[in-house]
Each structure stands twice: as structure tokens, then as C-alpha cells.
Image (cartoon, rainbow, N blue to C red):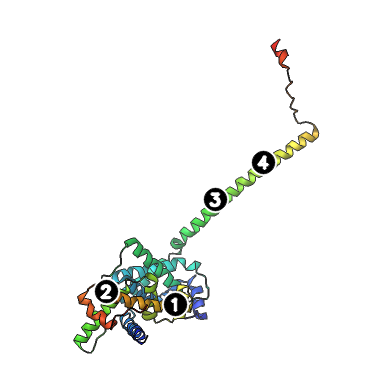
Amino acid sequence: MKQIRYQEARLARLLQNSLAPRHPRPEFVHSLREKLARLSSMPVLLEQPRHLARSVGLGILGLIGVVASAFAAALVALRFLGWVLTSLGLAPKVRPQPQVPDHELDS
Amino acid sequence: MSVTTEEVRLIRRAKRDPQAFGELYERYVRKIYTYVYYRMGNEHDAEDLTARVFQRALTHIDGYQDQGLPFSAWLYRIAHNLVANWHRDHSRQQVVGLDEALGREAGDQPHELAEDEEERRVLLRALRHLPEERQQLLILKYAEDLSNAEIGEIMGRTEGAIKSLYHRTLLTLRDDLVEHVEKGHPQDGEHARRVVPRGRRSS
């Protein structure tokens, strides 16, 4: 157990020495800062895809909504019209086809 | 490393004001670079991915939601995902250039310096063969000097889980070094033996 502790402590110390914080090149830090500043000063370019996608998505949803509503409204209207016509007795009556006995057909 | 009121205010400002994002950048660029560097193993890829981390942070900061975690946790998560994607896309472990990390600090004597460098080279090589999350843990612990609790916040685990993972990682690392010696790498053997004096597996 003591040996394990010793090894762990030694490994930990080595890791401490081996994984020292790194310093990026100042030119890199500077150029990335400028790049980010350029990107952030173009809010339209950055925001455009997100806004565009949102608009298109909302448009499609709206269109589906309008079509579905129109369809439902048309169904309701037709049923109502049918009911009105039936109530007024104006609905065309479907005459049942007369049943012709088979022997009459034969003669 | 809990999130401060000042940082919360800065993040809110950064959503509207690019200048404020610049402050966040200045605050974290070195930390993220260090993390990415040890995951990638060379300066070129580290710079490339660090740039991508901040570009992604800039474009997604609108959607950032304060969940009581430090802002750095969010950045580390972006960095972790980008590094993982990079390794997946390239399907190889980048080991070239880790030696750059060595020999930057002057030792007392030239031969001691050479031995220390060799020892670190062996250790870093073994480190880079660990699973991703274990590499992440060791880098955050040693390069970023974070506590287990802070690492837990970043990795989405409890402090106890991090502590346990850390100990298992040390044991794995030690066993990997022993295996390295046993498989016969004479050039590294002596240094691995120094890291693990009698090389006995514990578990």
C-alpha cells in the first residue's frame, strides 16, 4: 500500500511538471482577437442564417396551418349547408332503384 | 471556480456587445489553448482548434444559458467536442510534436535536464493513450490546476466520481508504463522504471 501511495505521489508530481500551462504565441492571440472582432462586427452575416432558418420554419408552419384551417372550415361549411338544405326540404332526394323481379326480366 | 456575478454580467453584455466578448476571450484564451494543446500534441492544431472554439462560442453565445456553472465549463465542453471530432475524423492519435512541450524549463544540470525531458516524454506518450475523459481530467487537474469539484462541474460529474476516476487513471497510467517497459522499449525503459520504481501492478 505504501508502495502504491509512493508511486501515485511520484506520478502526480511528474504530471505536475509535465503538464505545465502553455502560452500561445502572442501573434496568434492577437490575430484571433482581430478575427473575432471582425466576425462580431458583422452581426448581419452572423445572424442571417439563424434568422433565415427561423423565418422559413415559421413560414412553413404558417402555411400548413392555413391549409389545414381552410380544409376544416370547408368541411364544416359543407356539412352545415347540407343540414340547411335538408331542413328546408331542398335537398335532392335520391330515389331508390326499383327492384325488378328476375322473372320480369326474363320475359 | 463558481460563476461570479461579474462574469454573469459580462456574459450578458457579450450577447449584445462584441467588446465584452473580447474580454471573455482575453480571460480564457490561454486556458483553452493549454487544454487543446495537450489534447492535440502540437502547436499548429492547438491554434487551429482554439480559434474554432472561440468562433463557435461567439456564434452560439446568444443561446448560452447560465446554469450556475462557470463560463469556462461551457468553453471546455466546446473544446472537448471539437477535439473529439477532430480525432474521430482523423482516426489517429496525434503524438507528433509533444516533445515541443518538453525542455522549456531550465534544469540545474544538462544531464538532469535530459533525463527529466525523457521521463516526461514517456509519461506524456502514455497519457495520450488514455481514454479521452481521463486525458481531460489530468489536463484540467494539472495544466489548469483545477480542483476535483471544479473538474466535476466541467465534466458533469460529482466530486466523488472525479476523485475515483483520478485514482483509477493514475493506476492505469502506472500500469501502462509498466507494460511499456515489459513490452520492451529499451530507450524508454529506464525512464519508465524511474516513474514506477518496482513496477508492480496494484490491482
Earlier-in-chain disc, 2 versus 1: 1
Task: Kindly indicate the quadrant of the structure image that contains residue B114.
Answer: bottom left
Q: Please report, as a chain letter, where disc 2 is located.
A: B
Q: Amino acid at mark 4?
A: Ala
Q: Quadrant of residue B122?
A: bottom left
x 20%, y 89%: residue: B109
Specify the quadrant that holds the C terminus of chain A: top right
Reply above or below: B2 against B87.
Answer: below
Q: Are marks 3 and 2 on the same chain?
A: no
- Name the amino acid, label 1: Ile
Q: Do the residues bearing badges 4 and 1 touch, measured as CB atoms within 8 Å?
A: no
- Image location of residue A101, percent across then percent down: 73, 17
Whole-angstrom CA distance, mark 1 to mark 3, is: 47 Å
Q: Nearer the viewer, residue B57 or B21?
A: B57
Q: CA distance from mark 4 to mark 3?
A: 21 Å
Question: Considering the numbered disc 1 on the image, is that residue within a helix, a strand or a loop?
Answer: helix
Query: Which residue is the site of mark 2?
Result: B180
Per the image, the residue denoted by label 3 is A60
Residue under label 4: A74
Report how far apart the C-alphas of labels 4 and 1 lie in the structure.
63 Å
Q: Residue at x 49, y 74 (%)?
A: B11
**From mark 4 to mark 2, how far is it between C-alphas?**
78 Å
Q: Are marks 1 and 3 on the same chain?
A: no
Residue at image mark 1:
B162
Q: For the residues labelled 2 and 1, say whether their Cβ atoms are less than 8 Å apart.
A: no
Quarter placement of the N terminus of chain A: bottom left
Q: Are marks 4 and 2 on the same chain?
A: no
Q: Residues within 10 Å of mark 4 (few under 14, many from 20)?
A: few
Tell me whether the residue at label 3 lies in contact with that at label 2, contact meaning CB atoms closer than 8 angstroms. Answer: no
Q: Chain of mark 1?
A: B
Q: Report the chain holding disc 3.
A: A
